[in-house]
Amino acid sequence: MRAILGFLLLVNLIGCSSKTESRYVIETEVGDITLEVYQEKAPITVGNFLKYVEQAKFDGAYFYRVVRLDNQPINPVKIEVIQGDFTGRQYYFPVIAHETTLETGLTHKDGTVSMGRFDVGTTAAEFFICINDQPELNYGGKRNPDGQGFAAFGQVIDGMDVVRKIQAGETDSQMLKEKIKIKGIYALK
């Protein structure tokens, strides 16, 4: 009986010590970006992102769009992000439900990783990384007229120098003249 109770206690302790975030590396042709994703706070969004990662669907995708204060002249609410996508390739999985920052408690600060969207419920695979704090991308923010914000799900923990290098690239409007290839995204061991 003691052996069984000891085993159950050990299982319980192991279960309690599991991490709530996982680390991943975005390997690009200009350097690596390491991020943590927050599965417990944003399970739908992280689950979707990890499906693409686990099946190597981001391999060969690009950072193709950079939004800076100087290249959004008609938008009254300015933001700063770099955005990754398949750039013309198809999405592989159905769109997901929108997890607002009000629901998750995550906010768009410097280095936050979040999902792009058009209308609520259209999130597929495009993701972006914030440069500097971007409160207008949170729930109640004014970047989108619907006020629902974007679904934050992770945080860059190393490689913001690479993010800023990508953001500084030469653009035609907001599109990089030379897209930055994502070689792959993989779990950090």
Image (cartoon, rainbow, N blue to C red):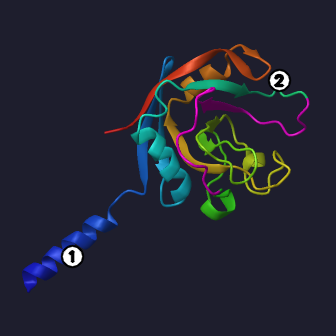
Dot placed on the residue nearer the N-terminal end, 2 or 1? 1
Residue 177 in view in this figure: yes
The overriding secondary structure of the stretch rendered in magenta is loop
Residue type at numbered disc 2: Asp
Q: Judge whether residue 19 is colored magenta.
A: no
Residue 74: where, in percent of width, then height? 91, 31
Residue 100: where, in percent of width, then height? 67, 58
User: From the viewer's perspective, is 142 left or right of 179?
Assistant: right
- The quadrant of the image that shows the C terminus is top left
Q: Which residue position is annotated with label 1?
A: 9
Residue 7 quadrant: bottom left
- The quadrant of the image that shows the N terminus is bottom left
Residue type at numbered disc 1: Leu
Residue 32: where, in percent of width, then height? 46, 26
Comparing 17 with 144, the one in front is 144
Q: Which residue is pictured at 53% across the width and 45% down the height?
A: 93
Q: Magenta region: which residues?
A: 74-97
Q: Which residue is pictured at 60% across the width and 31% down the height?
A: 85
Mark linked to residue 70: 2
